[in-house]
Amino acid sequence: MAALNYHHLRYFWAIATEGSLTRAAGRLNVSPSSLSVQLKALEEQLGQPLFERRGRGLQLTEAGRIALDHANAVFAAGDELLNTLKGLGLASRQALRVGAVATLSRNFQLGLLRPLVHRDDIELVLRSGAFADLLAQLEAHALDLVLANQPATIDLDSDWQNTLVADQPVSLVGHPQDAHDGLSYPADLAHVPLVLPGKGSTIRTAFDRWLDEAGVTPTIQAEVDDMAMLRLIARESHGLTLVPPVVVIDELGSGVLVERHKLPQIRETFYAITRRRRFPNPLLREIGA
C-alpha cells in the first residue's frame, strides 16, 4: 500500500470539521472540484467511503469517524512534536465518547467507567440527553456507547447491540431516626410519604403494579425523574424513597440512610448500547460493553 498522502488527510479533516465541502474549500483556498478530487483519492487509497450525503450536508461514515479520530491524532502528534522541542510535552490519548440518559444514576456511570477515569492516555467524552437523541448520535458515529436503563428496540433493519451490564433490586430507604420500624409492607405505605421515580421509569411501573395488586393508594410526596435529584430529596425527606441502592450507596455506607425494605421482585436494569461496527472502539472491551 502506498504511503498515506497527508495533504489528502488534511483536506479530509477540513471537510469533516467544516461539515461542508464548499466551506472547507473556502477555508483551504482551493476550488470545491479540486477538493473533491483529493477526497476521492484518499477514499480510494483507504478502500472506504468517508462521507455519505444527507440532504445538502455531509455526514461521516463509520470509516470516516475512525479516519477523523486518526487525523486528529496525527495532527495532535505534530503539535506534540513542536511543543516537545519547545520543552512542552503533550501525551497522545485515545478517546471514548459515552452518552448516558439524563435520568441514569451517576454512581452507576462512575462505577462502570472507573477503569478508564484515572488513565492519562484516555480522554472520556461524557454526554447526557434523552434516549432517542443519544441513539441518533450513536447511529451518526458521534458516540461509541449509550448507557441507559432500557434496551434499544431491535428489528430486522437495526444494528443495535444491547449488553446488560447490571441488574439489581430496588429498595425503600429512609433516615435511621425516622419512625419506620415495624411497618407492614405494602399495607402501611398508604400512610407513609413516598418519594418515587417518575411514571416513565420501569421501576415506578412495577412499584405501582405492586401497590395496585395490594389495593394500596400511596401518599406521594414527590415524583422525580432525575436520579441525582432523587438522591438529594431522599436525604431531605422524612418519608421513604424508592431507589436502586447504587444511587444512594454513599449515604447507605455512611449511615445517613438505611434500607427499610428490599423489593427483590422489582429490578433496575442497566444497558450498554452499541452499534455493530467493523471497527469498534477497543476501549469498549475494557468496560465490558
Image (cartoon, rainbow, N blue to C red):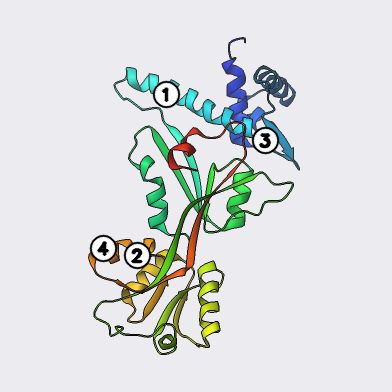
The residue shown at (37%, 41%) is 115
Q: For the residues labelled 3 and 1, say whether their Cβ atoms are less than 8 Å apart.
A: no
Q: For the residues labelled 1 and 2, say whether their Cβ atoms are less than 8 Å apart.
A: no
The mark closer to the camera, 4 or 3, is: 4
Disc 2 target residue = 248
**Between disc 4 and disc 2, whose residue precedes?**
2
Disc 3 target residue = 20
The mark closer to the camera, 1 or 2, is: 2
**Between disc 4 and disc 3, whose residue precedes?**
3
Quadrant of the image occupied by residue 76: top left
Within 10 Å of the Cα at label 4, are there few (<14), some (14-19), or many (20+) other Cα atoms? few
Quadrant of the image occupied by residue 260: bottom left
Disc 4 target residue = 253
| Residue 98 rendering spot, x and y as whole percentages | 49, 46
**Disc number at residue 79?**
1
Three-letter amino acid code of the residue under disc 3: Ser
Tell me how far mark 4 sits from mark 3, CA to CA. 53 Å
Three-letter amino acid code of the residue under disc 2: Val
Front residue of 13 and 204: 204
Task: Classify mark 3: helix, strand or loop.
Answer: loop
